[in-house]
Image: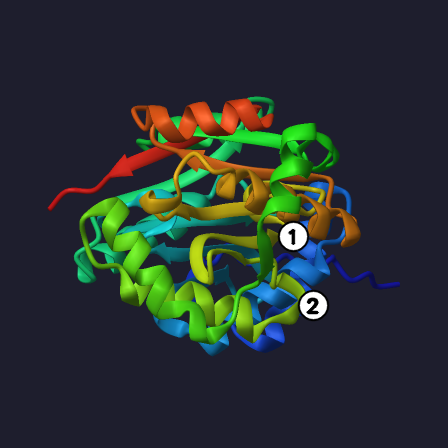
């Protein structure tokens, strides 16, 4: 009588490669095993965005001859949240339970850092909730530090209901962003920041107009002119989020129309639109010393989020 011993898998060094479209099922399955729920729509969107704009998305898999051991997705920040230099934003990273302890997370991060250095990018950013203990330990071991920008959040219904918000919405025409608005938005943005960000704003506009499911960017008109804009996007899973939120990337009001409720009108209409889409929360990130914007957002109903911003400064 003979018996056959179970086949033992050899220990193979994990190999990195770019994520491909046919990795979707394995990525969704691994993420669901880690998080307890499926985020298929999120990964479909992020892989699709990378195919459309590979220059601004980095997505890697770590596997051996047997299975997918881990994955990580990042995108290039060009001007979000008022930034004046590029950075790489780590959106999601996951390592299978079976592969933990083999340095796959560190391997994925090193690949991002190498690519960032090649592009002249000196900062790697991410966010995590203070409740994500494992992720916080991983970030600390990897050399990340708590960053100065504040992550703010607000319940969408509260943002839409305020009396001031409703009154501001009634006073100004607020409509969906159109391609023809770019020139005026660039002009206002340049006036506010003192530098040109046409490429960044063009990229955000292309994203807003190219994907109808995330088209939540708006402009406000006053006296037959564009008086302000709000560029926002839907976030279906970055940084381990389980529920979709909206992220406000850029908000600007022409100084000639300051203190006339333009910003309040934009936020109020944005909240109305988000509510119709079933989105219950909106978040943004603001520099800790941008007191005017912080004050405006706090008055509108934003408060500190349980999410923290982290940065790793890379050697030049």
Q: Number of labelled discs?
A: 2
Residue 266 image offset from top left, x and y in percent: 56, 46
* In the rendered image, the vertical position of residue 126 relative to residue 79, given as above or below: above
Residue found 28% across the figure and 60% down from its top: 187
Task: Answer above or below: position of 31 versus 60.
Answer: above
Q: Secondary structure at mark 1?
A: loop
Determine which residue is flagged by label 2: 25
- The quarter of the image holding the N terminus is bottom right
Distance CA(mark 2)–CA(mark 1)? 17 Å
Image position, residue 278 (x, y; %): 79, 49
Image point 63% across, 30% down: which residue? 164
- Neighbor class of circle 1 (other Cα within 10 Å; few <14, some 14-19, many 20+) is many
Q: Is residue 157 left or right of residue 233?
A: right
Q: Which residue lies at the image location 64% right of the left edge and 67% below the top edge?
A: 44
| Neighbours of disc 2 within 10 Å: few (<14), some (14-19), many (20+) | few
Q: Looking at the picture, how far across and down is residue 315, in whole percent? A: 14, 42
Which residue extends farthest right? 1
In the depicted structure, whether residue 211 falls above or below residue 189 = below
Asked if the residue at tag 1 contacts the one at tag 2, i.e. Cβ–Cβ closer than 8 Å, the answer is: no
Q: Quadrant of residue 82?
A: top left
Q: Which residue is mark 1?
A: 236
Query: Which residue in the rendered view is the most extreme toward the front?
Result: 223
């Amino acid at each position: 009588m003979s018996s056959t011993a179970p086949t033992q898998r050899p220990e193979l060094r994990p190999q990195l490669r770019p994520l491909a479209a046919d990795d979707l099922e394995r990525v969704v399955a691994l993420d669901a095993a880690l998080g307890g729920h499926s985020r298929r729509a999120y990964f479909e969107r992020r892989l699709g965005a990378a195919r459309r704009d590979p220059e601004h998305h980095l997505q890697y898999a770590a596997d051996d001859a047997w299975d997918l051991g881990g994955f990580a997705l990042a995108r290039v920040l060009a001007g979000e949240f008022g930034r004046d230099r590029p950075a790489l934003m780590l959106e999601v990273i996951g390592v299978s339970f079976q592969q933990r302890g083999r340095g796959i997370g560190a391997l994925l991060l090193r690949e991002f850092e190498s690519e960032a250095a090649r592009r002249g990018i000196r900062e790697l950013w991410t966010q995590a909730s203070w409740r994500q203990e494992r992720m916080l330990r991983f970030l600390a071991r990897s050399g990340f530090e708590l960053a100065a920008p504040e992550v703010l959040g607000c319940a969408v219904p509260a943002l839409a209901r305020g009396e001031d918000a409703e009154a501001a919405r009634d006073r100004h025409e607020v409509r969906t962003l159109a391609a023809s608005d770019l020139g005026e938005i660039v002009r206002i943005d340049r006036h506010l920041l003192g530098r040109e960000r046409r490429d960044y704003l063009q990229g955000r506009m292309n994203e807003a107009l190219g994907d109808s499911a995330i088209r939540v960017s708006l402009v406000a008109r006053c006296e037959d002119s564009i008086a302000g804009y709000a560029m926002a996007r839907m976030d279906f899973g970055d940084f381990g989020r389980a529920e979709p939120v909206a992220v406000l990337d850029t908000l600007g009001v022409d100084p000639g129309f300051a203190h006339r409720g333009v910003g309040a009108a934009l936020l109020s209409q944005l909240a109305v639109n988000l509510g119709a889409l079933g989105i219950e929360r909106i978040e943004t990130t603001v520099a800790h010393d941008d007191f005017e914007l912080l004050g405006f957002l706090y008055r509108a109903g934003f408060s500190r989020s349980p999410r923290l911003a982290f940065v790793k400064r890379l050697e030049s």
